[in-house]
Image (tube, rainbow, N blue to C red):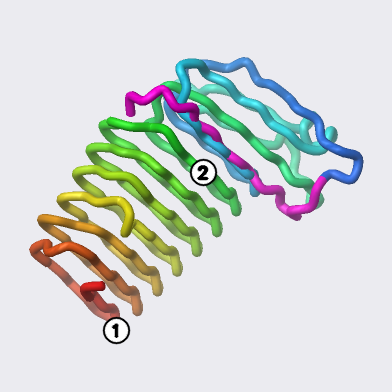
């Protein structure tokens, strides 16, 4: 996407409560990343900007336990060094010029905005993570598992991917020409498609669509495909 809007990501804490002693900010000076990998119930806000930035806000003990680095594959990884049962809310704000993919797990809550004219965007959510993404891309590829939820808005050409374990995709506000979805385990999808919709669904999964696309479907196990 080529707009100059910022991108941010918010992260929710494992136990969800505010830090009793107040919050502290920590800035990580990292750059040259195009993908994000986070878990630990962070609340993440991602915005597009000309510069790179990563700021975490939370309990001082939790802040001190964070580590962040950029892998050889240009992936920004943010995580805790140690496993503790008690964590307070952790908010994370990220800005970056370009976004190619996110991998959020462990009940992360995220918002992604401001990325236009992307070529390809990969969105992977697992472990009851939730995300709202306002983007435009030639192709968006999704992988949703473990009761995760994705609200996709904007526009593109192609949408594809896999949903499992009672995951949900709401893309009625993300119009595409072609969509190809594979759903299982009581997952559900809502899509807006103009040319071709290909669906494989099993295990009581459900797909509703808007538009007048050609339909190609393989349904089993009480799954359904219907026009909204």
Name the one closer to the observer, 136 or 89: 136
The residue at the point 31 percent across, 46 percent down is 141
* Residue at screen point 45% across, 37% down: 113
Query: Percent position (x, y) of residue 104?
Result: 52, 45
> Residue 111: which disc?
2
As rendered, which of 145 and 18 lies closer to the eye? Answer: 18
Q: Circle 1 — which element?
A: loop
Q: Is residue 3 left or right of residue 149?
A: left
Disc 1: CA contacts within 10 A as few (<14), some (14-19) or many (>=20): few
Pointers 2 and 1 in contact (CB under 8 A)? no
Q: Residue furthest bottom?
A: 222
Part of the protein shown in magenta: 1-18
Residue under label 1, please give it.
Answer: 222
How far from the left and from the top, in percent, is residue 103? 47, 42
Task: Determine whether, in the image, residue 61 is placed left or right of residue 148.
Answer: right
User: Dominant secondary structure of the magenta stretch?
Assistant: loop
Mark 2, secondary structure of its residue: strand
Image coordinates of residue 134 in percent, x first then y, are 40, 43
Identified at 28% across, 60% down, the residue is 191
Does 15 appear in magenta?
A: yes
- Within the image, what quadrant is residue 65 found in? top right
Residue found at x 44% / y 27%: 5
């Amino acid at each position: 996407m080529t707009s100059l809007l910022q991108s941010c990501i918010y992260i929710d804490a494992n136990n969800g409560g505010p830090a009793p002693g107040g919050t502290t900010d920590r800035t990580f000076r990292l750059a040259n990343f195009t993908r994000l990998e986070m878990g630990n119930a962070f609340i993440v806000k991602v915005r597009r900007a000309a510069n790179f930035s990563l700021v975490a806000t939370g309990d001082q003990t939790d802040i001190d336990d964070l580590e962040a680095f950029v892998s050889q594959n240009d992936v920004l990884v943010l995580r805790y060094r140690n496993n503790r049962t008690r964590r307070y809310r952790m908010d994370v704000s990220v800005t970056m010029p370009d976004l190619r993919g996110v991998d959020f797990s462990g009940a992360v809550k995220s918002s992604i905005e401001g990325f236009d004219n992307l070529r390809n965007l990969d969105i992977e959510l697992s472990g009851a993570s939730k995300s709202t993404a306002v983007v435009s891309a030639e192709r968006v590829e999704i992988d949703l598992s473990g009761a995760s939820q994705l609200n996709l808005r904007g526009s593109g050409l192609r949408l594809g991917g896999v949903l499992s374990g009672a995951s949900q995709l709401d893309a009625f506000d993300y119009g595409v020409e072609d969509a190809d979805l594979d759903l299982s385990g009581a997952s559900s999808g809502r899509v807006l498609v103009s040319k071709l919709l290909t669906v494989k669904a099993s295990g009581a999964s459900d797909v509703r669509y808007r538009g007048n696309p050609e339909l190609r479907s393989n349904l089993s196990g009480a799954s359904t495909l219907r026009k909204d």
